[in-house]
Image (cartoon, rainbow, N blue to C red):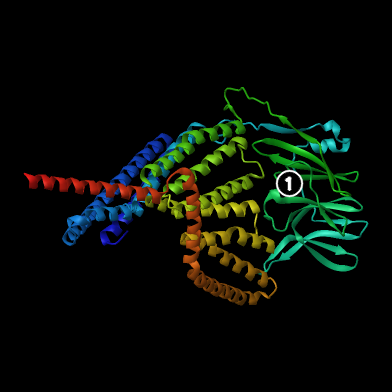
Amino acid sequence: MCNSLDATFVWVGAILVNIGYVALITWGASTLWPVGFVLCAIYTACLYQLAIWLQKHEDDESSTQDGQQGRQSSSHSADNTNQEQAPFEILRDAEAGARPARKISLPVNLLFGLAVVSFGVTCFLLPINLVKDCNSGGTFVPDYKWETNLTNLPKEVRSWASNDDRGMNQPAASFAYVEDTKITLFHGTRVDDSGDVHRGAALWTVGSGGPPKRQAEYTDPDNFVAVSNSSICFTSFIEGRAPFDKRSSKICCSNGNNITIAKPTGPLYQTGWIGQFLPNNGLLWFKLFFSEPTAAGDLIYSLDPQDMSTKLYSYKVKNNSDDSDPSKPPPCHPTKTARFQSVAILIVAALPFTLASILVWYSRKIPSMAVTTYAGLTAMYACIYKVFDPLMTNDQADWWFGLWFAITGTGGLVICTYFFLSERSVERSRPSFQWGLVVTALGFGFGFIQILDLGGDTSGDWILLNLLVFVPLLLLGIVNGNMFLVFLGCVGFLADAARLAALIGDHVRGDARDPVVFVVFSLTGLAAGLLGFQLSKYQPSVHNFAKHRVDRLDECLNSSDGPTRDQESEEYSLSLLESSDAAAGANDAGTHLVSDD
């Protein structure tokens, strides 16, 4: 690609010019979006025309070289053959098949890919600017709001429930004493593995004449309150969750000997912020402050520490508030706006982007269109999903997107492998399936890791991670001769080595962990090298086995579709031979007529 000094500098200059133009488009889109739209459209047209010109230029050079080689071959053939051998030369050429398709260079490939991506960005600028979301203007109006009927609450609780003060500035107790068990729970210091001291970051218990004992599962405890003589409650983060994420805070209650985590009813406990506590008649009353685009308001709960049962006293009602004051911005309903914006992006941007990728591939067989087509289909799926979940509030959103990547990645790997090995695909389209293998392999790995939630906390997680992700990618890479898939499969060795080193390191002293890492990674690297050496011996056999299976499948499909390619080639060769015989007979007849005259 850069086999000369001038070509290298041309590539560097082209990269710098593209970076500068992208910066100009970004400036235009951020200041005045019509300017950015026009600049992006011009950039798209320039890229596409440059890609067409460069492809035509390379085709002309290739045709010139092929013509010279053809003339040399014809001259050599004419010197060593006679007229009687001509039919057999025609038959040999027919059996040899067509000349291999010209390879599309990397610059042409990237230029077409950049042109299609730029086209998609140009289309995207229209709906994202014409259909404004609630953050761009208008008075934010949630679709629902939370209300509480105070008459349903005890008299002692009503004043507390109606108070808008969310307890942000109220002092919180750092300990609580359980009268019945004579045990005190308090927050104290925690020393991490590196020796750093974190004050108030650990939960400790003391009593019954024994030394203080740390409860390692609970971090950053706060808001201690005694509910009765036999139970106290507090808030805490659970080990393994983000320590400073308000949404992962939990309410915990204890009788001094056991600690139980409360699970209030309703889907909002995971997305609200826990506020004030109020103990009353053996129950713990607390507020859950909730402010999301779908609903907003304060939720009132009661909790019984004896059985950890909870009751929600708030209810969700339709928010019909509509501020008609002309001096204020019009109300903006986020759900309706987000849904309409998703439909607009789907129709104006995602669908045209996908169709453009397919059209360029169909007309010019550009391999990079496999990547842009998959990106376009994913964008269409995201838009369709947002129609049903406009604000992405569903806890299963990550699972649904993981399912999309897992299904499309698996299907893409199977389809691309089949057409890459099959005789049905023409030579010119094979690089497209190689690119398709790369992009679908990435989606396959990400999707399965996402839907199975393979965090690696247990040995079973790591076994599934290897069997369902790394091993299939390694085998498919060997079958297709795709080294990128082989590399993705070999990432499993790195993950396994890191996991094994961490497991062993947890059972040794801190100063011995580095030697453990050295030994584990060294042995894993040697094992990977030996495995690769052995697999390289069997790689041709594995490829041929898969190729044979695909050929058998092609035979079954061809038997039902019509004549096979070999049959068509044989019939074409016979027709050429018959036409050659007929031409030779005509020449003989003309020779006899001349002789008679």
Tag 1: residue type? Asn
Which of the two residues, 597 or 201, is positioned nearer the viewer here?
597
Residue 139 placement: quadrant: top right
Q: In which quarter of the image is the C terminus?
A: top left
At 83% across and 59% down in the image, what residue appears? 185
Residue 257 placement: quadrant: bottom right
Numbered marks: total: 1
The residue at the far front in this view is 596
At 91% across and 60% down in the image, what residue appears? 182
Which of the two residues, 299 or 488, is positioned nearer the viewer here?
488
**Residue position marked by numbered label 1 in the rendering:** 169
Q: Where is residue 557 in the image (x, y as percent from the top left)?
A: 49, 47
Q: Position of residue 286 (x, y in %)?
A: 80, 43
Image height of 396 relative to 75, above or below: above
Which of the two residues, 444 or 345, is positioned nearer the viewer here?
444
At 48% across and 31% down in the image, what residue appears? 130
Q: Where is residue 420 in the image (x, y as percent from the top left)?
A: 45, 54
Residue 231 seen in this snapshot: yes
Residue 224 seen in this snapshot: no
- Secondary structure under tag 1 reads loop
The residue at the far right in this view is 180
Image height of 65 relative to 297, above or below: below
Image height of 257 relative to 508, above or below: above
Image height of 467 relative to 430, above or below: below
Q: How crowded is mark 1: few (under 14 residues within 10 Å), some or many (20 or more)?
A: few
Q: In which quarter of the image is the N terminus?
A: bottom left
At 26% across and 59% down in the image, what residue appears? 6
- Relative placement, left or right, of 344 versus 584 is right
- Relative placement, left or right, of 50 versus 168 is left
Q: Position of residue 387 (x, y in %)?
A: 59, 35
